[in-house]
Amino acid sequence: MFLFAALLSLALGLALGIPTAQVLGLISSTAFVGVGMGMHPAAVLVIMTLVEIGAVLAIYFICDAFVIQPVRVRDMLKRTEEKMQKVPLLARYGAITLIILPAVPVFGLYSSAVIGWILRWDRRLSRFFIAIGWVLITVFLILVALGLLRVLA
């Protein structure tokens, strides 16, 4: 999945005349790098979103692989699920909380996917809300990188 998203990103970069090295640099970094390399903000947003989709799908695939693991892993996942159910924000709002988790340094994008998987929230809704959160944080970072928004000024 991640490879497919990376290939789509490379194809988009090729179609837009963006050098492959710049697209690969963006895939492995943040929106700041893309803007700093002079890439168009819309291209940065699309490429970063494709990478997010690929990463989230890959994480769900890896998590699904854990289900068939020994009892010890399943028990650990069950204990983790029980602990996470006690977090008021997660318990109250469910998958909608995945909009804000990509922006929270402690959780971020990758943990958001794992949290959605562990808590068995609807996969489509979870991926949708993670994507919304990712797009919002990417737009925010692009605006900061372009100097249109100042943080802690």
Image (spheres, rainbow, N blue to C red):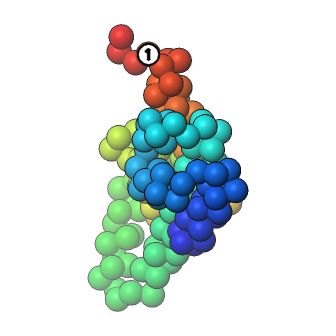
Labels in figure, total: 1
Q: Is residue 90 above or below residue 21?
A: above
| Quadrant for the N terminus in the image | bottom right
Q: Which residue is mark 1?
A: 150
Q: Amino acid at mark 1?
A: Arg
Taking depth in this image into account, of 79 and 60 the one nearest to the observer is 60
Q: Is residue 37 above or below residue 148?
A: below
Taking depth in this image into account, of 1 and 76 the one nearest to the observer is 1
Location of residue 13 in the rendering, given as x and y in whole percent from the top left corner? 62, 55
Residue beneath the point at 67% across and 50% down? 16
Location of residue 53 in the rendering, given as x and y in whole percent from the top left corner? 59, 59
Residue beneath the point at 46% across and 40% down? 37
Q: Quadrant of residue 14?
A: bottom right
Q: Secondary structure at mark 1?
A: loop
Q: Is residue 55 visible?
A: yes
Q: Are there few (<14), some (14-19), or many (20+) residues within 10 Å of tag 1?
A: few
Q: Residue furthest top?
A: 153
Location of residue 22 in the rendering, given as x and y in whole percent from the top left corner? 48, 52
Residue beneath the point at 40% across and 50% down? 29
Q: Is residue 37 above or below residue 151?
A: below
- Say left or right for 99 vs 104: right
Q: Is residue 130 visible?
A: no
Location of residue 6 in the rendering, given as x and y in whole percent from the top left corner? 55, 65
| Quadrant for the C terminus in the image | top left
Residue beneath the point at 48% across and 32% down? 141
